Amino acid sequence: MKLSIDHVTDFSYDTEVAHSIQYLRLTPRQLPGQKVLQWQLDTPGSVQATTDAYGNKLHVCTVDQPHRGITIRARGTAEISETEIPETENRVPPQVFLRTSELTEMSESMREFTRGFSTEKGQPERHQLIELMTALLERIPYRPGITHVQSSAADAFAQGFGVCQDHSHIFIACCRWLGIPARYVSGYLHAGDDQHIASHAWAEAWVNDAWYSFDISNGLATNNRHLKLAHGIDYLDASPVRGVRWGGGNESMRAYALVDQIDRRQSEEQAQQ
């Protein structure tokens, strides 16, 4: 399946910013289940391309002149496999993703919830993690506006509602408590016939010597509708856009990501001719 992506992030500030740095993980890489056909990153200022500790493509954007706003645009086309192809290569050992963080710490209520998925026969199998994913979505329904970008897994679990970032953090925390390496993933989802209008987050767990995807918010346990940008211990490692600035006062941000299936659109256009 071929996808086109157009992702725009726009920052504006109340007062002039003297200097800003943005850390961008907005460029997908070639993976067993995804092939990047064309990609372009448009930014202000100067940009340095590198690779982070987890193998993600990282661009550091520096604007060293006074400014009142920044617009960042990532766009391109990619092809994703219609059959699931999990990742097996590791830049760092999978055990690194057993390490917890402030965003993925377990609360007592989370431990109580997770105990029902532990097993005396060793680590849970993939089908048991799918059951965990299903139970988690029932326990924490998707609802925007309740949590925020700095909410931890424990915060969202206590609130009883969350979005894809919260679902991923909670699932990751539960997996690690069960002894299963798990990592946070950012990227894009093709939601079906309609265009998806936001970037997305899901989790990957190391099961049977491979990384399998778990999109808790959508109840999906395959990666054949996802285009991956980055992964890490938590959101802070894999966020598409993070930055620091000097000055500017209050900040407002607008972002959208349009994900469209190219081959479906072309077929529809040909049928109309």
Image (cartoon, rainbow, N blue to C red):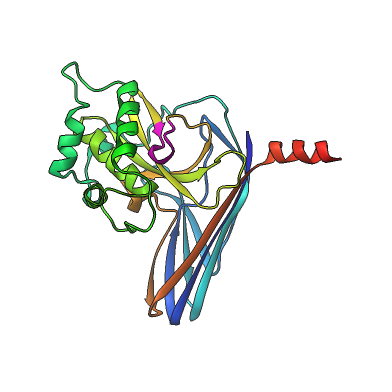
Instruction: Locate residue 8 relative to residue 214 in the image: left or right.
Output: right
Decide if residue 42 is in sight here.
yes
Residue at the spot x=37%, y=49% of the render? 163
Residue at the spot x=53%, y=35% of the render? 225
Residue 213 % position (x, y)? 41, 32
Instruction: Locate residue 103 relative to residue 63 in the image: left or right.
Output: left
| Number of on-image labels | 0
Give whichever of 139, 110 is nearer the camera. Answer: 139
Residue 215: say if magenta.
yes
Give whichever of 116, 80 is nearer the camera. Answer: 116
Q: Quadrant of the C terminus?
A: top right
Q: Quadrant of residue 30?
A: top right
Q: Quadrant of the N terminus?
A: top right
Residue farthest bottom in this picture: 15
Residue farthest left in this picture: 108
Q: Which residues are magenta?
A: 213-220
Q: Quadrant of residue 144?
A: bottom left
Residue 254 % position (x, y)? 50, 65
Residue farthest right in this picture: 273
Residue 3 % position (x, y)? 62, 41
Residue 83 % position (x, y)? 54, 24
Q: Quadrant of residue 113?
A: top left
**Whether residue 11 is situated above or below residue 195 in the rendered picture:** below
Decide if residue 39 is in sight here.
no
